[in-house]
Amino acid sequence: MIRISDVSKSFVLHNQGSAVIPVMEGASLSVAPGECVALVGNSGAGKSTLMRMIYGNYLAGAGRILVGDVDVARAEPREILTLRREVLGYVSQFLRVVPRVPTLEVVAEPVLAAGGSAEAGAARARALLARLNIPERLWSLSPTTFSGGEQQRVNIARGFAHGFPALLLDEPTASLDATNRAVVLDLIEEAKARGAAIIGIFHDLEARQRVCDREIDVSAFTPARVA
Ligand SMILES: Nc1ncnc2c1ncn2[C@@H]1O[C@H](COP(=O)(O)OP(=O)(O)OP(=O)(O)O)[C@@H](O)[C@H]1O
């Protein structure tokens, strides 16, 4: 479902004499439907950079990033937007929302964007918000004033609302209490069971061991640096 081959990436620091910083070289990995792969490696190895390239936020310098049959490394912005609506979900660490939109709508929105009905979106949003222990009295309010942990859970509910065939998870259990962490791990296992291909960054070792089938050490893709 996700096939990455020979991807490289350099950053050009335009405000620092256009210095070129190579951060990745020859990155290759595949994730099959139903599989969860953890990106590991020391800080600065390139885990977030690789995730951002897969999502199309950073442009790969070379190589192929196939998500389904779309090569994100070469796709037009319009194709990437379609991919993000239908195929590729991304649960980032922080919730970014339009102010004043009620939580229920925030969570249901990906279902509607993927072509689901308003009823299906609302039902899914209710079920997820209840499972993630967001009190019902908050559902009609905007999440902008929610606590950090509540916002994170709304973000997770939104990320799992549509049944994306491919999912990127950036520390989905970070700073959650034990009960909600267990719910998130269940959601990941359910997504795998329905065939989602998942790539994640999990600093939570126990969570990684429970839901991930393999680890890929991205420091293997860090270019050798001239000291
Ligand atoms: N926008 C950017 N401009 C310049 N350099 C960048 C940019 N983003 C990342 N880098 C560099 O790329 C390298 C990889 O960073 P990245 O954030 O992907 O690492 P990471 O493995 O996710 O680290 P951590 O575990 O600390 O989050 C680092 O040396 C970083 O400084």
Image (cartoon, grey):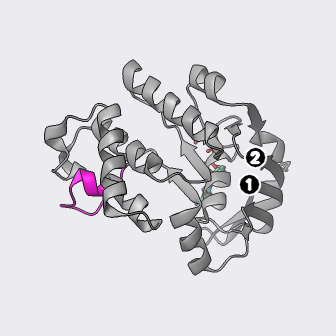
Q: Amino acid at mark 2?
A: Val
Q: Above or below — where is 141 with respect to 86?
A: above
* In the image, residue 107 above or below residue 67: above
Where does the magenta region start and end? 95-106
Say which residue appears at 46% left-offset and 46% top-offset: 160
In the visual, does 226 lie left or right of 187? right
Locate residue 106, reporting x and y percent. Answer: 31, 56
Identify the residue under disc 2.
31
Residue 201 screen position, x and y as percent: 60, 39
Whether 103 is among the magenta residues is: yes
Residue 173 in the image: x percent, y percent?
Answer: 47, 31
Which residue is the extreme one toward the left?
137
Q: Name the residue located 47 percent from the left edge and 65 percent from the top edge.
A: 114
The number of numbered discs placed on residues in the rendered structure image is 2
Kind of residue indicated by mark 1: Ile
Residue 96 seen: no
Q: Is residue 38 magenta?
A: no
Residue with the mark numbered 1: 2
Q: Main secondary structure of the magenta part?
A: loop
